[in-house]
Image: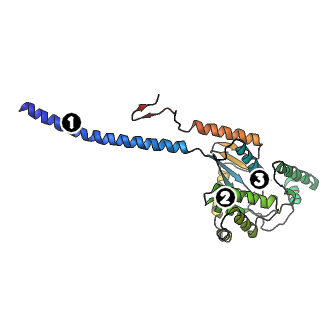
Amino acid sequence: MGFFNRFIRLFAVSMTLMIPLRVLSESVDSLKTKQVITINKVKEIKTMKIVYWSDYACPYCYIGETRLKKAIKELGLENEVEIETRAFELDPDAPKTVETITVDRFAKKYRLSKEEAQQQIDHISQLGIDEGIDFRYATTLYTNTRDAHRLTKLAQTKHDTALEDRVSELLFDAYFTRNEKLAEHDVLLRVAREAGLGETEAKNVLESNQFEEEVRFDEREAMMRGVHGVPYFMFNGKFVIPGALSVSAFKHTLEKALKDQQENTVGEDAHQCGPEGCRI
């Protein structure tokens, strides 16, 4: 009887241990599955995020954005880069009607003679022309740009980068090529219509104060980051280009950001340990 009782007790203990072992086995299988899913998700994150602060009345912003897009295209990164525009009003108190001509405003701001101001304006215009833009800076009609930024914020709610890009391009074109007033709602509604953004929705936004707080948030963030001028480009939150540098400079920064991104992304050859052991 002694031997039989000891056998029964050992059998009971073994059965008790088998239950958690089975559960543990199932948990390990589940963990392995989850681990694979997690790794796959990391590997799918290939998009480089470029955030940049800009104003539609800023000539270097238009030139800089154009150069950035050229750099992206030359590197073949069109499907691997996401660009997000942040608002930065050069003059939040600018009037909604045209009060000055460009050369006079330029001369007063930089304390230049009209001749010197005109030379600088022509030089900036040529930079735009060299990038393939029909750049007419001398005849721009300067007004407040907040509503243009609010329209951009509406486009961003659609989570369609192509749509946002069209809105941005059309707003720059309206100011620097068409020489239109960006404070006029008719101009902004045309931009919305041509970009494929709902005109009725755009009209409702422009007739309200919707997205004003989002614009101010962008500008507060810029101040916190020490951004005092635009354009200001930030690549993956790490690498910065403060200004409209050359296409080659943009390419260099893109390559550096891409290399950093690849080095910090889990890949098939990454050293890692799991339930079945370590990869060696």
Q: Which residue is mark 1?
A: 14
Work out whether mark 2 precedes mark 1 in sequence or the reverse, and give the earlier one.
1
- Numbered tag placed on residue 163 in the rendering: 2
Q: Nearer the viewer, mark 3 or mark 2?
A: 2
- Numbered tag placed on residue 77 in the rendering: none
10 Å neighbourhood of mark 3: few (<14), some, or many (≥20)?
A: many
Work out whether mark 3 precedes mark 1 in sequence or the reverse, and give the earlier one.
1
Return the x and y of residue 144 as percentages of the image width and height.
Answer: 76, 64
Query: Which residue corresponds to the image point at 81% horizontal and 58% vertical from the top-left?
Result: 176
10 Å neighbourhood of mark 1: few (<14), some, or many (≥20)?
A: few
Query: Which residue corresponds to the image point at 71% horizontal and 38% vertical from the top-left?
Result: 252
- Numbered tag placed on residue 62 in the rendering: 3
Distance between mark 3 and mark 1 Cα atoms: 75 Å
- Compared with 178, 271 (above or below) is above
Q: Nearer the viewer, residue 110 or 248?
A: 248
Could one spot residue 268 in this view of the protein?
yes
Amino acid type shown at disc 3: Tyr
Q: How many marks?
A: 3
